[in-house]
């Protein structure tokens, strides 16, 4: 497989599939739905074959493809994956069939809706696999267009405003990153080759003025902090979560937002090791504030979708904390957290979406006693909620524990503060379950239990949360060597 352009096939397949779905005849939704499902399952199969062929003990970047793209700019078509990129690609391709199935009836004419989702999948895969910084930036920014239409066109009454806010925040971050990208291009000697630049930074061959390096770091970091989102750049996410369709919101929170934290780990730390090390106390402070602040706000929410969005912001704080403590446990935990958060958030949000679709309201006070009439819905919601609060035996516990363990090595005070979110998460999850599912019935007669299609959506998510909670080694064996390479590069590039 090493000689085949498997990474190109991985992103081209959903892009071509999007064109096929969009070109299908109008008025016949079933062919479009099944075509999209076939494409996502095919891409999942291809990504699994990639994972089987990947050698954790081999070269850092594998399945590398290198071709000329814009020679006059020093830009190339460079693709390759390490263990970190691989597990995030697997997360993306595993969630896409589930997202398509969850949004099965979201649009009367699903052709454009599903085609836009496939385009996003394609662009996310390129973003994780790109080894040319300009190539990464192009797809990082281009995915704003399909996401804008997915949010604004198919969401609720406030979706247009939420989509515009998302777009403006993201474009502002992209503008700062573009300026930093130009600066990096000049400083690196007219090249965008990530591996080449990082190698010269680590060896000391490429020396950038410290002030310039700090500014470049901040340009990249701002774009990734908005995308993640990181406090205080998070304010666009609750509106999107509340107004977009559940499938679109999951695509955003569980897949697209991971590019922000991936970018911090891949680009900020390795391209600018001195700036990252010097400024990490500030980043960690913001991350810890975000962990606690978002958890507190989640407790007070009256909208179930906004509540889950705030839990997601708190979890992203843990991921960023693990990245910037710069320890092996912290970064391995952060990478695993990206995967586990994707599955847990998808499960909780989609089940909540199924509930809301039955009653037509997101207000928590309008519910009660659901477990009496829909025990399967209530039971699966409880398991997803337990995963969100990092119950031992479920996937998020391992990643959260590793992040806190890695943080304690260098910042014990921050560890204690961040650990308070464990109590807060138990409060907001258990209160939410109590208010929705137990007590006297308030309109619960209108709520039916999960139908087979919805059970098919939820079952693989819960199964993955259990498997990764009981046997995280299958993921950590791939992640750990890539984290070791990242820390080695960071250590070699940092010169006190």
Image (tube, rainbow, N blue to C red):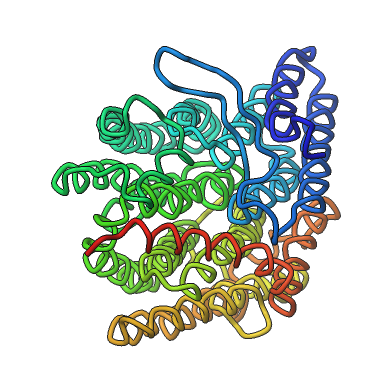
State the residue at coordinates (61%, 60%): 339
Q: Nearer the viewer, residue 228 or 263?
A: 263
> Which image quarter: residue 335?
bottom right
78 shown above or below 413: above
For the residue pair 297 and 91, the one nearer the viewer reads as 91
Q: Looking at the figure, which quarter contains the C terminus?
A: bottom left
Q: Where does residue 132 sit, x and y in percent of width and height? A: 49, 32
Q: How many marks?
A: 0
Residue farthest toward the left in the current orientation of the protein: 211
The N terminus lies in quadrant? top right
Q: Quadrant of residue 342?
A: bottom right
- Side (left or right) of 275 relative to 145: left
Q: Is residue 137 above or below residue 448?
A: above
Q: Position of residue 188 (x, y in %)?
A: 32, 33
Q: Can residue 447 be seen here? A: yes
Q: Position of residue 429 (x, y in %)?
A: 52, 76
Question: Which residue is at the front of the view, 173 or 440?
Answer: 173
Which residue is found at the position 49% from the left and 28% from the top?
135
Residue 159 left/right relative to 356: left
| Front one among 253 and 32 | 253
Q: Position of residue 304 (x, y in %)?
A: 49, 61
| Residue found at x 33% / y 74% | 292
Instruction: Report whether residue 238 is seen.
Output: no
Work out whether 408 lies above or below 454.
below
Residue 337 in the image: above or below residue 211 = below
């Amino acid at each position: 497989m090493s000689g085949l352009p498997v990474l190109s096939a991985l992103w081209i397949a959903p892009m071509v599939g999007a064109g096929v779905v969009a070109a299908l005849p109008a008025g016949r939704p079933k062919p479009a739905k099944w075509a999209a499902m076939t494409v996502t399952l095919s891409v999942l199969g291809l990504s699994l074959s990639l994972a089987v062929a990947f050698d954790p003990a081999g070269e850092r970047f594998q399945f590398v493809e290198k071709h000329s793209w814009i020679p006059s700019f020093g830009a190339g078509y460079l693709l390759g994956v390490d263990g970190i990129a691989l597990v995030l690609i697997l997360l993306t391709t595993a969630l896409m069939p589930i997202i398509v199935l969850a949004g099965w009836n979201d649009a009367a004419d699903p052709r454009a809706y599903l085609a836009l989702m496939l385009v996003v999948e394609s662009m996310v895969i390129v973003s994780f696999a790109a080894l040319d910084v300009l190539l990464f930036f192009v797809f990082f920014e281009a995915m704003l267009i399909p996401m804008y239409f997915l949010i604004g066109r198919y969401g609720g009454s406030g979706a247009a405003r939420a989509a515009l806010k998302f777009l403006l925040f993201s474009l502002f971050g992209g503008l700062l990153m573009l300026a930093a990208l130009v600066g990096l291009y000049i400083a690196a000697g007219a090249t965008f080759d990530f591996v080449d630049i990082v190698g010269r930074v680590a060896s000391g061959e490429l020396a950038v003025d410290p002030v310039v390096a700090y500014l470049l770091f901040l340009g990249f970091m701002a774009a990734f902090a908005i995308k993640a989102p990181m406090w205080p750049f998070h304010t666009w996410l609750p509106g999107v979560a509340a107004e977009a369709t559940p499938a679109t919101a999951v695509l955003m929170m569980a897949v697209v937002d991971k590019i922000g934290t991936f970018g911090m780990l891949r680009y900020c730390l390795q391209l600018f090791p001195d700036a990252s090390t010097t400024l990490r106390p500030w980043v960690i402070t913001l991350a810890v504030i975000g962990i606690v602040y978002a958890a507190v706000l989640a407790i007070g929410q009256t909208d179930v979708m906004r509540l889950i969005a705030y839990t997601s912001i708190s979890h992203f704080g843990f991921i960023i904390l693990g990245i910037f403590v710069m320890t092996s446990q912290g970064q391995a935990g952060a990478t695993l957290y990206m995967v586990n958060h994707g599955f847990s958030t998808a499960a909780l949000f989609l089940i909540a979406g199924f509930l809301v679709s039955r009653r037509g309201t997101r207000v928590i006070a309008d519910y009660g006693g659901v477990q009496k009439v829909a025990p399967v819905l209530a039971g699966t919601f409880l398991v997803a909620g337990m995963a969100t609060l990092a119950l031992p035996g479920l996937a998020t516990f391992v990643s959260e524990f590793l992040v806190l363990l890695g943080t304690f090595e260098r910042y014990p005070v921050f560890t204690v503060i961040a650990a308070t979110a464990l109590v807060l998460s138990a409060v907001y999850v258990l209160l939410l379950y109590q208010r929705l599912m137990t007590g006297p019935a308030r309109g619960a007669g209108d709520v039916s239990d999960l139908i087979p299609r919805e059970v098919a959506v939820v079952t693989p998510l819960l199964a993955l949360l259990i498997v990764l909670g009981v046997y995280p080694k299958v993921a950590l064996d791939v992640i750990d060597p890539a984290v070791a390479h990242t820390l080695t590069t960071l250590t070699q590039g940092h010169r006190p």
